[in-house]
């Protein structure tokens, strides 16, 4: 069988230069990724490809394309166990369920741009996909409240609709 691939971007030019001869967009077998150690302290995991490709340069960081529920493939990553983790998914029931799944593997995970204010500012009345999940999720109180509202009303805001300027501003506030 063909082993799944993990795609990541090195967001720090110095790390890309010193570790990968300047290569900053890498696809690697899951088994190799899980053993990979890159000298960064922050890892962003994003659900969708567009956000992965447009994620801004940040020192001391990488971004991983999570591909939705495919984040389960990287649950044994050595690097992720010791990094500050940020997960960014769609504002729909599944996005929060994936955040919960990922946080189950890595309890230190923080959500990124998955808050009520962002949702209310950019929501465009899109419908989501119904979810039958009824287990207790690994969400903060704020995330759980927003998840339940979105799930009950079957709402969706795709992360691609969040302006890049807000992504950059939020990252600058973190650093």
Image (cartoon, rainbow, N blue to C red):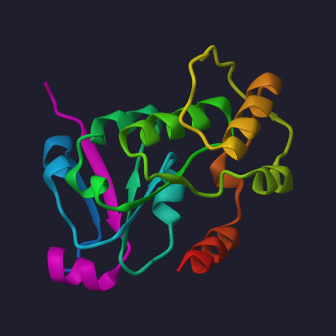
Magenta segment includes 68: no
Magenta segment includes 6: yes
Q: Nearer the viewer, residue 5 or 119?
A: 119
- Residue 121 visible to the viewer: yes
User: Which residue appears farthest toward the bottom when viewing the image?
Assistant: 14
Q: Nearer the viewer, residue 104 or 124?
A: 104
Q: Quadrant of residue 43?
A: bottom left
Q: Is residue 115 left or right of residue 108?
A: right
Image position, residue 151 (x, y; %): 74, 26
Q: Is residue 88 left or right of residue 117?
A: left
Q: Is residue 74 above or below residue 115?
A: above
Read off the magenta span.
1-21
Total labels: the figure holds 0
Q: Is residue 17 above or below residue 103?
A: below
Task: Identify the residue shown where x is 65% and y is 19%.
Answer: 131
Image position, residue 2 (x, y; %): 16, 30
Image position, residue 138 (x, y; %): 53, 36
Image position, residue 98 (x, y; %): 51, 35
Task: Identify the residue shown where x is 38% and y is 55%.
Answer: 64
Q: Quadrant of residue 163?
A: bottom right
Task: Identify the residue shown where x is 56% and y is 18%.
Answer: 135
Q: Is residue 19 above or below residue 28?
A: below
Q: Nearer the viewer, residue 147 or 48?
A: 147
Q: Quadrant of the N terminus?
A: top left
């Amino acid at each position: 069988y063909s082993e799944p691939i993990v795609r990541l971007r090195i967001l720090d030019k110095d790390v890309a230069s010193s570790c990968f001869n300047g290569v900053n967009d890498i696809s690697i077998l899951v088994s190799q990724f899980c053993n990979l150690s890159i000298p960064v302290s922050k890892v962003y995991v994003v659900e969708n490809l567009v956000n992965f490709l447009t994620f801004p340069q940040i020192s001391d960081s990488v971004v991983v394309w999570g591909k939705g529920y495919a984040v389960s493939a990287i649950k044994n990553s050595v690097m992720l166990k010791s990094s500050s983790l940020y997960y960014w998914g769609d504002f729909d029931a599944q996005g929060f369920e994936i955040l919960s799944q990922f946080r189950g593997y890595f309890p230190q995970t923080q959500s990124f741009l998955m808050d009520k204010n962002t949702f209310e500012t950019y929501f465009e009345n899109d419908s989501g996909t119904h979810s039958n999940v009824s287990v207790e999720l690994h969400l903060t109180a704020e995330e759980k409240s927003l998840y339940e509202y979105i799930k009950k009303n079957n709402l969706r805001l795709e992360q691609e609709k969040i302006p890049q300027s807000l992504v950059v501003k939020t990252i600058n506030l973190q650093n």
